[in-house]
Amino acid sequence: MTQDRIDDVWGERTPHARGTEWPTRVDLHLHDGVREEEVERWVQSACLLCSNGCGVDIAVKDGRMVGVRGRATDRVNHGRLGPKGLYGSTPWASSPDRLTRPLVREDGRLVETDWETAMGRIVAESTRLLEEKGPLSHGFYTSGQLFLEEYYVQAVVGKAGVGTPHMDGNTRLCTATAAAAFKESFGTDGQPGAYDDIEHCDAVFLYGHNMAETQTVLWARILDRTRGEDPPKVVCVDPRRTAVAEEAERTGGVHLRPRVGTNLALMNALTREVLENDWVDRDYVEAHTIGYDDLVATVAPYTPEEAERICGTPADDVRRAARIFGESEAVLSTVLQGFYQSHQATAASVAVHNLHLLRGMLGRPGAGVLQMNGQPTAQNNRETGADGDLTGFRNWDNPQHVRELAEQWNVDPMTIPHWAPPTHAMQIFSYAEAGTIGLLWISATNPAVSMPESARIRRILGGDQCFVVVQDLFLTETAELADVVLPAAGWGEKTGCFTNVDRTVHLSEKAVDPPGEARSDLDIFVAYADAMGFTDEDGEPLVKWRTPEEVFDAWREATRGRPIDYTGLSYDKLRGPSGIPWPVDEEHPDGTVRLYADGVFPTQTEVCETFGHDLVTGAAHTEEEHRALRPDGRAFLKGAPYSPPHEEPSEDFPLRYTTGRTVYHFHTRTKTGRAKRLDDAAPDAWVQLCASDAEARGVADGDWVLVESPRGSIEVRARIGPVMEGAVFAPFHYGHWDPTGLCPDAETRQANELTMTVWDPVSKQPTFKTAACQVTKVRTDERRR
Ligand SMILES: Nc1nc2c(c(=O)[nH]1)N[C@H]1C(S)=C(S)[C@@H](COP(=O)(O)OP(=O)(O)OC[C@H]3O[C@@H](n4cnc5c(=O)[nH]c(N)nc54)[C@H](O)[C@@H]3O)O[C@H]1N2
Ligand SMILES: Nc1nc2c(c(=O)[nH]1)N[C@H]1C(S)=C(S)[C@@H](COP(=O)(O)OP(=O)(O)OC[C@H]3O[C@@H](n4cnc5c(=O)[nH]c(N)nc54)[C@H](O)[C@@H]3O)O[C@H]1N2
Ligand code: SF4
Ligand SMILES: [Mo]
């Protein structure tokens, strides 16, 4: 049976009562013309098109992936799949424009070559730069979409082979704030809550998270509660009236509409209300937290009326939302890009932790926080340290942690960069711009479309000051600018593990061979390490592993005794009916559903992943300062005053520009743009503005408009919709790649032409959700003429 997940995004309801199990519903889709009985093999995996991590089986026929089926037994999705998972998981793989051979730049043009030539050029450039300039000449910019094993090898190669601190992922654009917020509040990264909390909560708060479009299966899970007996109330914090906001209104919850860029003022007001009404679990706060008095003082000025003045959100709505939080027994909070990609990102996300700590709502059924991830494997990048962090949630500022890794890898601790914080992605691009990074290796990400201020990024990638390697499935907007392009094997064409938002680890098995000469990212990084001759202290190869499973087994050892313990997991164990949530060790052989059930947090000075930061300035605290606070397993309550965004509306740019997603596309569309059903559903870019802002500009629905910011402009169609007055929303999926060739303005539609190069002081996550813009009508929609 094939479902329609284009018009019916969440599928049919399977409502159920609080505390009962989420029913199973199996979703299946096969390519046109393929019947179920023709499928030769079903291969175990999990969906790679968002962080939800739905369990799937891949259908194989004649050596090709021909569809997917949700895994009924998986704890994450109980069989369900959403539109991207169903229709977008497999068609790209057999697309005729896959990269099948390496490319190198000759006389300004990219030409096909063999692996020896392509890798030879990289190794020659790398060797020359290491000899002439040392390790700081190298930068690695990776992904949230590779497998755990691939990141781990990349981390080892970067840290112990090359020895560069310039390593990060597009996770910086994605979930750096989730990691930073966990570290500031709880000591290390690691998701406290679990999806199962949906079955037990009596309220769900979604902060800057359009879950209905971005984790559709998780949203279906919430709908099955809100449409069942004893439903939870939903509270939505979003300047747009999304499907989440509608559900908030329907369930008697609240839709809080903060002005774009004012989250922290709203959070401070919610916190103040909880304190004022004494909805505080005093015993919990006393036993398990520090920082209460400072927090009380910080939020004191933020009355609901003050929030209304700053955020434009009615004071009574703030009161109602705070009451729901204060009077519920079990609240589940989810946080995502409306918070993470705004200025003051870490402070606003930490404020969500504060609310839960004040109410003692962590670690028990229904009471949990999900600082969401976005990309399917963002978590693993953070775990392995391919984002620059020290592997296994270790602290780069703790010499003992560095020694542990050096022992693990059998290298001198001094080869592992730890003299300064790891370089974040935005800084890596600045170094590449200046040419101090002379070799930038980009894997599984398309920064020419996804990084802020596109014109600048194109200049950096296309210039002569830096040698750019791009490893991808397709000749993306980024690959077009590279010096060497390496053809990679994708999901289903290689084996590896990855971990979703609620720490559930899945094994994804190879189903088919990659096309042509494409190789797995793991094989490519191993080949580079071998060719460079990186060795350990005994002169043995630094990277000793050849198969994903060998890497996984080595990785397990690197996590032993850390909060993220994988030692009880193995490929065999992961071949069971469901993914398994870490930590998995001798004490918890079947995994751990919730962290911090005992109220003990990994904040001890010897254990924590960071000594903490000032949330306003980002200034790092020292070990001595941390020790003096004696956190000793207690969580930090941390507050910060609100400050306005970097760019406020002005006479020339009177509107607030914010960006995000649509349900039918994943990022720069390299997969979903090659799935006909999805591409047909959303073939071209647009901006959303409200009726009054449109009317003031003489703009009707469907008209072509020019959207300008101080950094650039785009020409797209206008959609009039329920976005807050004064705000303009643009999806960021559309670069100049235009699969149908039907989009008249494909060259001028990229949302990031307008965004700015600024970032949060703590997480260093760039700000995609605040800028100023103007909208003017260009021409009437030709379809209406
Ligand atoms: N369909 C689809 N699903 C995806 C993805 C995709 O590309 N497409 N990508 C995946 C990835 S990597 C990620 S990171 C997630 C992202 O998932 P989300 O964070 O849910 O998606 P966004 O659309 O980026 O932003 C969420 C909401 O933030 C709101 N917002 C904008 N400005 C503000 C503000 O100032 N304050 C508040 N409170 N809200 C604001 C927007 O109106 C938007 O509805 O989605 C994942 N899932
Ligand atoms: N304005 C604005 N900009 C944003 C955002 C926003 O909300 N607004 N969101 C940001 C966020 S949260 C994210 S996550 C980023 C996403 O931005 P990108 O990371 O640029 O997005 P993708 O299009 O997913 O790029 C992944 C690339 O990896 C390739 N790929 C897939 N699988 C593999 C593999 O196994 N191996 C290799 N080598 N390549 C592979 C794909 O073909 C694709 O080119 O965008 C960010 N940019
Ligand atoms: S919710 Fe995410 S993981 Fe699940 S099917 Fe949809 S895209 Fe895939
Ligand atoms: Mo993301």
Image (tube, grey):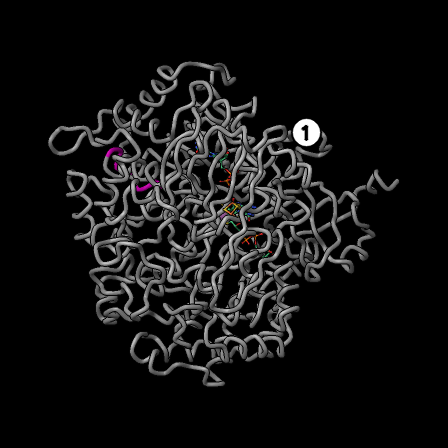
Q: Which residues are magenta?
A: 161-167
Is 336 placed above or below 739 here? below
Q: State the residue in front, 433 or 596.
A: 596
Q: Residues within 10 Å of mark 1 (few under 14, many from 20)?
A: few
Q: Position of residue 565 (x, y in %)?
A: 26, 52
Q: Position of residue 270 (x, y in %)?
A: 52, 75
Q: Which quadrant, please, contains the C terminus?
A: top right
Specify whether residue 765 is in view: no
Disc 1 target residue: 740
Q: Residue at x 61, y 34 (%)?
A: 675
Q: Position of residue 512 (x, y in %)?
A: 44, 26
Q: Secondary structure at mark 1?
A: loop
| Residue at the extreme left | 538
Q: Position of residue 579 (x, y in %)?
A: 38, 48
Q: State the residue in front, 93 or 340.
A: 93
| Residue at the extreme right | 785
Q: State the residue in front, 108 or 638.
A: 638
Kind of residue indicated by mark 1: Thr
Is 283 placed above or below 307 here? below
